[in-house]
Amino acid sequence: MSIRDAATIVLLKRFDDGLRTLLLRRHRASGFMAGAFVFPGGKLDDDDLLEATLARAPRTPAIERMKATPGRTLDIERAHGLFVAACRETFEEAGALYARRRGEDALVRLDDDARWTAWRERLTKGEVPFSRMLEEEDLELDLGRIHYFSHWVTPSAEPRRFDTRFFVAEVPPGQTPALDRHELVEERWLRPSEALELHHAATLFLPPPTQRTLEALASAETFEDVVALAARRAERISPIMPKVRIIDGEITILLPWDALYEETDGESIEAMDPEPEAGRPSRIVIKPAAG
């Protein structure tokens, strides 16, 4: 079963009551994570890897530190492309763009400019590639604005599988993210702790990677705290591939440091260092939201 590379950005915004993150609910007819609240993101496209695209996305040191998933390859161009994919998908699904015009310091401001709405619509429909927008608008992606945070691989029990890199980023000034209304049907800005409370009350459903990401962010009071947390995690990020097991009649997600992980059926990742996730509970019971 093939695994597709993917990328997602946890968008964070400062509110009076603290940091909130954008969660988007996928359509119940979606082929993957139907009905779940997720961060904006999606699969790596061939266009993300083109020389012309990468030339408009200056490399950052974080790209070179990204490690391959055991059993898979990851050259520098593909790692670079994953950063680009995170930016592209976030623009398509949420309308946030980490780009500036060449020669300028500030990121582009998208509010009240119908041109960007038109570009986003054409990209979402597949009418034009991201590289074309970057070229025609003379844009350069600012990859330093997104911070590598975690790495999850879909369990082998799932029919559709993704090798996903998670990033965190603050919403740029002059931009108001909003969902694309295609595969996504609802948007909510929630504090990480608030989202977790709703999830545990079965009011909304968070997939395991989303849940664990929000748990890691729950103690951050400012975006500067998030950046510092990402920096501390940077050298210890390695892929987490859960396994699925029925325990006491409940669908249970086992993480690699669980005592039953190795004896449970399913693909494993060898020589895996689960830090910085270790120390947290090793099991997640799946309880989809009511309705």
Image (cartoon, grey):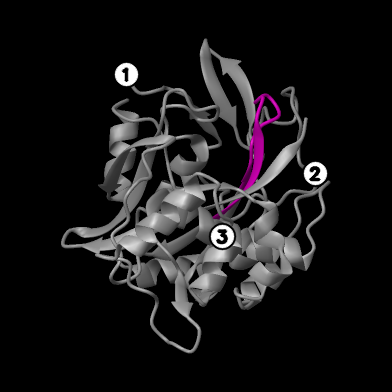
Q: Nearer the viewer, residue 157 or 113?
A: 113
Q: Give residue 270's mark.
A: 2
Q: Nearer the viewer, residue 226 or 35?
A: 35
Residue 239 in the image: above or below residue 201? below
Q: Which residue is mark 3?
A: 130
The percent position of residue 274, horizontal first and vertical second, equals 65, 49
Q: Which residue is mark 1?
A: 290
Range of magenta residues: 152-166
Amino acid bearing label 1: Ala
Q: Residue drawn at (66%, 34%), measured in percent from left and top?
A: 161
Is 91 covered by the magenta stretch? no
Q: CA distance from mark 2 to mark 1?
A: 37 Å
Q: Nearer the viewer, residue 278 or 188?
A: 188
Q: Residue drawn at (57%, 28%), measured in percent from left and top?
A: 253
Q: Could you tell which of marks 1 and 3 lies nearer the N-terminus?
A: 3
Q: Is residue 216 visible?
A: no
Q: Residue drawn at (39%, 56%), measured in percent from left and top?
A: 118
Disc number lying in front (2 or 1): 1
Amino acid bearing label 2: Glu
What SS does tag 1 mark? Answer: loop
Viewport quadrant of the C terminus: top left
Q: Are marks 3 and 2 in contact (CB under 8 Å)?
A: no
Instruction: State left or right for residue 184 relative to residue 285.
Output: left
Q: Give residue 116's mark.
A: none
Is 161 covered by the magenta stretch? yes
The percent position of residue 263, horizontal first and vertical second, equals 75, 25
The percent position of residue 170, horizontal first and vertical second, equals 37, 66
Residue 2 in the image: above or below residue 118? above
